[in-house]
Image (spheres, grey):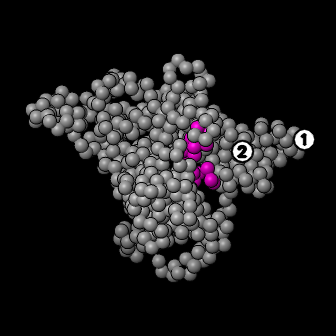
Amino acid sequence: MQGFLVRRLVLVVPTLFLASLVIFAIITLAPGDPVRMMLGTQATPDEVAQERARLGLDRPVPVRYAIWMTHVLRLDLGRSQVNDQPVARLVLQAFPYTLRLTAGALAVSVLIGFAIGILAALRQNRPADLVFTGLASLGLAVPSFWLGILLILLFSVTLGWLPPSGVAESGAPPLAALRYLVLPVVTVAVSNLSVFSRFVRTAMLEVLTAHYIRTARAKGLGERSVVIRHALRNALIPVVTILGIQFGRLLGGALITEAVFAYPGIGRLVVTSILNRDYPMVQAALMLVVLIFLVANTIVDISYAYLDPRVKMGEAR
Amino acid sequence: MRAGGGRAATVIGRLLRHRKGSFGVVVLAALVLAAVFCPYVSPYDPAQIHLAAQLAPPSPAYWFGTDELGRDILSRVLYGARPSLGAGLLVVVLAAAVGSATGLLAGYTGGWPDAVVMRLWDTLLAFPAVFLAIGIVAVLGPGWINGALAIAAINIPIFSRLVRAITLSLRGQDFVAAARAVGCSDGRIMRAHVLPGCVAPLIVQMAIAAPDAILVEAALSFLGLGSRPPAPSWGNMLSAAQGYLGRSATYALFPGLAITLVVLGMNFFADGLRDALDPQQVRSV
């Protein structure tokens, strides 16, 4: 198991390296001169050249990449070109917000997704299944930003139960902070929930026809035990894989949802820094997103091995 | 495709008898009709400002109400079909073309071209799709075409892997060996013998990718990175509507409803198409 863990973790490094190349290329190719943006149109060519030298933008591209990379490895992410704050601090400020949002949405979609998926599988082609399947199709088609707007319209504008945007001031009691999280979490969760419950349903249907389920029933086990101990554990294997793939979707959903709710997370940081051409910021935020995504997938792979001892071999590959 | 007419007719017949598929066909037809004929069926010019009727609720004069400038929302929703359908089409055509060319080449030749192309796709797939699209829009600059190019780019790896996988399985078949034996060039074998085997899965993948592309395009316009105002698109209408939630409850309703209906219909269309092209396989998802 340890060998598998180490091998799996080592695999993250080359992908992260390639991703850093892609991110650097994106930023280097981006049009618009950040120095001109910072100094305004009044700056003389001399001032521009000086500033470019100060930021290292006059060096050849590979050298700039190497410099950036060595800084990143020392966790020095540079300063924002817009407000001169350390990028690391801004990113670290935004990160917990995104983490709270995605973790909340993940928890909600896993809990409800499992419940709905199992129920739909047990009631295959009966009214409850058809209703759930229909709702899942709808949940997949509804754009998250529209859902967010509808929720604001209902729960904030009309009913006045929940705040329409932003986050609680720091130091607010946890319950007050939670109120700000409800609508964004629901918004992100709905589309994931829909995908998720479908996969649980399919996996359960497949497992429920297996011989060992018939055996379990034949030896007189209660339905609850058959479903939970025998069927669910085996159905988990394909579902957990999907969880890894879904995580990217979850992050993408969080990005758009943050925009709807003026929620100060990584997604909003990426969008505003792109609009401001704040290169160090975009680089750092995108790197962090890729890192989170890779770590999530690695965790999924590892738990996959835990759930299905046959996977551990890895040597077979 | 030779002798394809009969097969196409069978597939269309199956699609129309498919419950979800037929719903999808209707929605897709409505979308195409709206995109093509919106100048003739819209009650108003989508840019025409009616200052006397700002943020008006639905009424006989304005069926869907009006926006903050008094523009007719129904007309704008109808015109909004254009960037949506356009993005869907452009994305799937581009992604399918580039994806099948690279996938075919990688799968057929193997060796280092295969390794290089596949590592590149692995890296691109390491990014959450929406973030990558936004990164690409950052390079190209905001706008409808650039948004569509970015969405095409995030779809290319998927198409490429699909075609590569099929190519790998066909490459070793007897009919390919036979073609080589009678002296066909590699180019001809790829074009005339391998590619046709990829067509059905490619069509299904295009049908799956199109509604997704429409959703991402709407999201990009919502964020201000795709279609730009004043040209009406469902995404930027919703972005504007969010500022007036307290004053008009219906403004935000119709553009979102349009996106949902189209995406739902096209998802069903893809389901139907998949079943129609491959009726033996009964799927439960």
Tell me if residue A143 is in the magenta stretch.
yes
Q: Which residues are magenta?
A: A137-156
Q: Earlier in the sequence, mark 2 or mark 1?
A: 2
Q: Nearer the viewer, residue A44 or B168?
A: A44
**Is B58 rendered above or below residue A156?**
below
* Disc 2 to disc 1: CB gap under 8 Å: no
Identity of the residue drawn at 41% across and 66% down? B45
Q: Nearer the viewer, residue B76 or B59?
A: B59
Q: Residues within 10 Å of mark 1 (few under 14, many from 20)?
A: few
Amino acid carrying label 1: it is Gly
On the rendered structure, is B261 left or right of A70? Answer: right
Q: Nearer the viewer, residue A302 or B186?
A: A302
User: In this figure, which residue is indicated by the disc labeled 1?
Assistant: A220
Residue A141 visible? The answer is yes
Residue A116, labelled with which disc?
2
Q: Position of residue A84 (x, y in %)?
A: 29, 25
SS of the residue at dot 2?
Answer: helix
Tell me if residue A138 is in the magenta stretch.
yes
**Is A125 rendered above or below residue A101?**
below
Q: Are marks 2 and 1 on the same chain?
A: yes
Q: Nearer the viewer, residue B153 or A52?
A: A52
Identity of the residue drawn at 38% across and 71% down? B188
**Is A286 rendered above or below residue B177?**
above
Q: Position of residue B158 (x, y in %)?
A: 47, 54
Using the image, name the chain to which the residue with label 2 belongs. A
